Amino acid sequence: MTSLALSTRGIPAPTGVSINISTEFVRPAGGQGDDLVCIGTVEQLGRTLGYTRCEFKTPATSSPSAIGDGHGSGKEGGKLVAYGSQTKFMGSFKPVTSFSEDGENELPLESSSTGQDKAKL
């Protein structure tokens, strides 16, 4: 889920190599067939490292907003079951796409004709 979160920043798969990964289990999640909501976020993105986090929660209700369909945050009311973090080394990645502020539309990358975006050797 954390690699998928990085792809929302335009970073192509594979998104890099894990240099740190952790998981904490807070409470039992229920039984077989029970639903869980997973929310992956990019906490910080640097030149070579990406810091990500994910949370697993029980859905608050059976309403669509409880499972994060864009009408709600998906974070309200559910009980935290587990969370994790991952630090990824991405080398000299270059985003291949970008997205609108709401994440609904893919946008073209702006190209620089001045060459200022090229890495210095």
Image: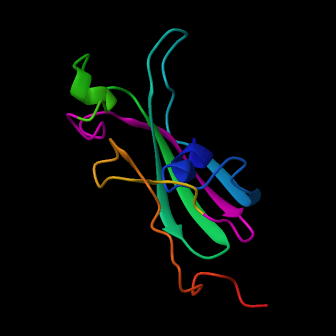
- Seen from the viewer's position, the closer of residues 68 and 7 is 7
- Tell me, yes or no, whether the highlighted magenta stretch contains residue 57: no
Residue 108, percent from left and from top: 44, 55
- Seen from the viewer's position, the closer of residues 100 and 33 is 100
Tell me what residue is drawn at x 58 percent, y 56 percent: 96
Q: Is residue 94 above or below residue 14?
A: below
Over which residues does the magenta segment extend? 71-94
Q: Is residue 16 above or below residue 45?
A: above
Name the quadrant of the N terminus. Answer: top right
> Can residue 24 be seen?
no
> Can residue 110 be seen?
yes
Residue 66, percent from left and from top: 27, 28
Name the quadrant of the C terminus. Answer: bottom right
Residue 59, quarter of the rendered image: top left
Residue 110, quarter of the rendered image: bottom left
Residue 47, quarter of the rendered image: bottom right
Residue 7, percent from left and from top: 55, 49
Residue 1 appears left or right of 62: right
Tell me what residue is drawn at x 65 percent, y 82 percent: 118
- Seen from the viewer's position, the closer of residues 94 and 42 is 94
Tell me what residue is drawn at x 47 percent, y 43 percent: 55
